[in-house]
Amino acid sequence: MWHLVEALSDLRGYARRLTGDASDANDLVQETCRRALESRRLFIAGSDMRAWLCCIVRNLYRDRLRRLSREVLVADYDQAPAWAPERRPSWALVSDDDLALALASLQPQYQETYVLYAVGGHSYQQIARKLQVPSSTVGTRILRARLMLRDFLSRRIDAQSAGAPAPDVSSEASR
């Protein structure tokens, strides 16, 4: 038997828990009812209609989240203040010399593994065979090398933008 109206309060509560907003929850329930009515022929008589409707609510909510995650908000060009300076991304401030210093600051096992992967384009398995270590060790070394490089370059960029002398290799090697 079709009892959509009886399930509305449960659907609203479930949608409210998902969205955290009454208005969005009402929209979600309304869309769920529309979809349920359009596809009522797919409902299997004797099964749990509330579970079927909750599944529709959940799927609609997930679809909305996916759609929102792909949405890019672009401000109107006319609304941007004319005085706002164009800010370069921080990675654009990294020079080749900075990168060379950062690589030189790595401990040898991290440096060799990272260079084989990032510059040489070798797979974890190839690097593991060459260095005679497990491939999980290769992954760990690459992760640690990335973190150390990011830390070194971030501090270097911060120091350059503040006008302070940038960290050098000798201070990094002693760490």
Image: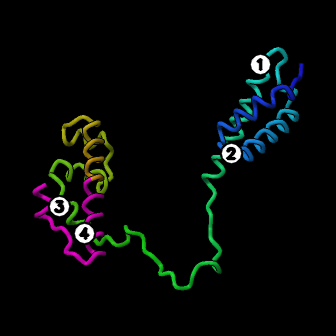
Q: Separation of disc 3 and disc 1 at Cα? A: 64 Å
Of the residues tagged 2 and 4, which is closer to the observer? 2
Q: Earlier in the sequence, mark 2 or mark 3?
A: 2
Around disc 1, counting alpha carbons within 10 Å, would you say few (fewer than 14), some (14 to 19), or many (20 or more)?
few
Q: CA distance from mark 4 to mark 1?
A: 63 Å
In the picture, measured across the screen, residue 54 lies left or right of residue 84, that is right
* Relative height, residue 50 to residue 116 (above, below): above
Sequence-first tag of 2 and 4 = 2
Secondary element under disc 1, as helix, strand or loop, is loop
State the image coordinates of residue 45 (x, y, percent, origin top left): 85, 17
On the image, numbered disc 2 is attached to which residue? Answer: 21
- Tell me the residue at 81%/27% (across/down): 7
Residue located 42% across and 74% down the image:
88
Q: Nearer the viewer, mark 1 or mark 2?
A: 2
> Which residue carries the number 1 mark?
48
Classify mark 3: residues with Cα within 10 Å, few (<14), some (14-19) or many (20+).
Answer: some
Which label number is shown at residue 104? 3
Give the distance between the C-alpha atoms of the residues marked 2 and 4, in whole angstroms: 48 Å
Asked if the magenta segment contains residue 157, the reply would be: yes
Q: Amino acid at mark 4?
A: Asp
Residue 44 image-quadrant placement: top right
